[in-house]
Image (tube, helix red, strand yellow):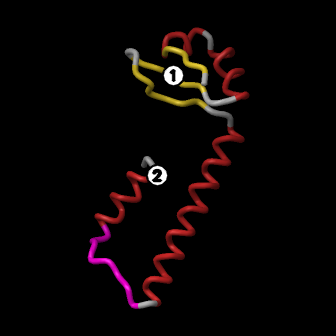
Amino acid sequence: MKTFTANEAKQKLGLVLDAARTGPVTITKHGRPEFVLTSKEDYDAMAELRYEKLKREVSLGFDALDRGEFSTQTIAEIFDEVKEEFGL
């Protein structure tokens, strides 16, 4: 994975975009990885995987409810877990 500092990314945007066409690019700030730039095609594929995973989890939840199983977690707790898992 190619890596650019934020300053390099600003100065060499065309090069960064070209690199992102072939694979993810890490952009660092103050020496730490902060962002990953990827192609629209890769982003769409990741979004589809997240959507499919969410559909599976929801289906498993409904199956558990059909079996009479349920959670004592609050909606807020579940929502926090989902946000963390999906990086929201």
- Asked if the magenta segment contains residue 32, the reply would be no
Q: Give SS at disc 1.
A: strand
| Residue 15, percent from left and from top | 68, 14
The residue under the point 46% across, 52% down is 86
How far apart are labels 1 and 2 at the CA level? 20 Å
Q: Report the quarter where the N terminus lies.
A: top right
Amino acid at pointer 2: Phe
The residue under the point 42% across, 53% down is 85
The residue under the point 55% across, 18% down is 3
Residue 1 horizontal side relative to residue 68, left or right: right
Q: Give SS at disc 2.
A: loop
2 lies above or below 67 = above
Label pair 1/2, CB-CB below 8 angstroms: no
Q: Which residues lie in the magenta part?
A: 68-75
| Residue 86, label in figure | 2
Amino acid at pointer 1: Ile
| Residue 27, label in figure | 1
| Residue 4, percent from left and from top | 54, 16
